[in-house]
Image: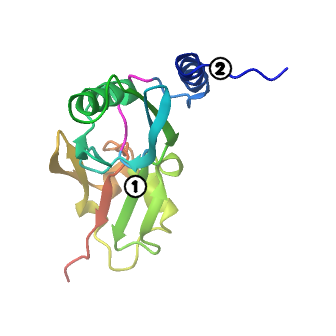
Amino acid sequence: MNMRIPGAAQLAAVLMFAATTALARPATEPLEPGDVLQIEVYAGGEKQNEFSATVSPEHTIVCPLIGSLEVDSTGTLGIGEKLRAILARDYFVDPQVLVSVKEHGGKIYVMGEVRHPGIYPLSDGPTVLSACALAGGFTDFAAPQKAKIARYEDGKLKYITVDFMKAKHSRAEDVRLRAGDRLEIPHRLF
């Protein structure tokens, strides 16, 4: 027996399925730079739009029809509410917006005087010491006691000074890195 579910009931079934199959991160947990979001827009009982958006280091995403949208600390639930309000005001009658995390994309950037500078998954290098180990250690020209972490907080770039030599000997904190952090190891002066 093949039954067709009417539009509103079909939408409700899709919403319930999406809510139960979303990734483990709670809907109200803040998003990290590099996270890839899957966004679906329903109106009139039918899917109107579907797209992916990546959270930038400035905590914004780019959406069709809307452009750049700030994603604050409200998580996927808050983003869905923001999008729904904008789309209801300008484009659709009573839209429903589903937002889920498609991919946790936390990355860190290790630059400067390390053997293998590059982009690394945050899960592989949660502290500055382990991030440098991932990058192959320091070159002969590194100044590890003058390293810096460039980090966006509240939309502003700030720098945190790190002394690797003290951290290595437990005389200073082995700073935990966050998604989007850029670890810079400078060239020493002779």
Q: How many marks?
A: 2
Nearest the eye: 183 or 73: 73
> Circle 2 sits in a helix, a strand or a loop, which is it?
loop
User: Is 156 situated above or below 99?
Assistant: below
Mark 2 = which residue? 5
Q: Is residue 78 at least partly visible in the picture?
A: yes
User: Is 89 situated above or below 124?
Assistant: above
Nearest the eye: 7 or 166: 7
Q: Is residue 38 at least partly visible in the picture?
A: no
Task: Give the percent coordinates (x, y) of residue 44.
Answer: 43, 26
Structural crowding at the residue carrying mark 1, measured as other residues with C-alpha within 10 Å and reported as few (<14), some (14–19) or many (≥20):
many
Question: Is residue 28 shown in magenta?
Answer: yes
Task: Give the percent coordinates (x, y) of residue 55.
Answer: 35, 47
Foreground mark, 1 or 2?
A: 2
Residue at 35% of width from left, 74% of height from top?
A: 113
Q: Quadrant of residue 73?
A: top left
Which amino acid, by three-letter code, is at mark 1? Ile
Structural crowding at the residue carrying mark 2, measured as other residues with C-alpha within 10 Å and reported as few (<14), some (14–19) or many (≥20):
few
CB contact under 8 Å: marks 1 and 2: no
Nearest to N terminus: mark 1 or mark 2: 2
Q: Residue furthest right?
A: 1
User: What label sits on residue 108 in the rendered view?
Assistant: 1
Which region of the structure is painted magenta?
A: 27-32
Give me the C-alpha separation between circle 1 and circle 2.
46 Å
Q: Quadrant of the C terminus?
A: bottom left
Q: Quadrant of residue 164?
A: bottom left
**In the displayed structure image, the side of residue 24 where residue 177 appears, left or right:** left
User: Is 141 situated above or below 180?
Assistant: below
Task: Give the percent coordinates (x, y) of residue 68.
Answer: 23, 48
Task: Give the percent coordinates (x, y) of residue 74.
Answer: 30, 25
**In the displayed structure image, the side of residue 98 where residue 159 appears, left or right:** left
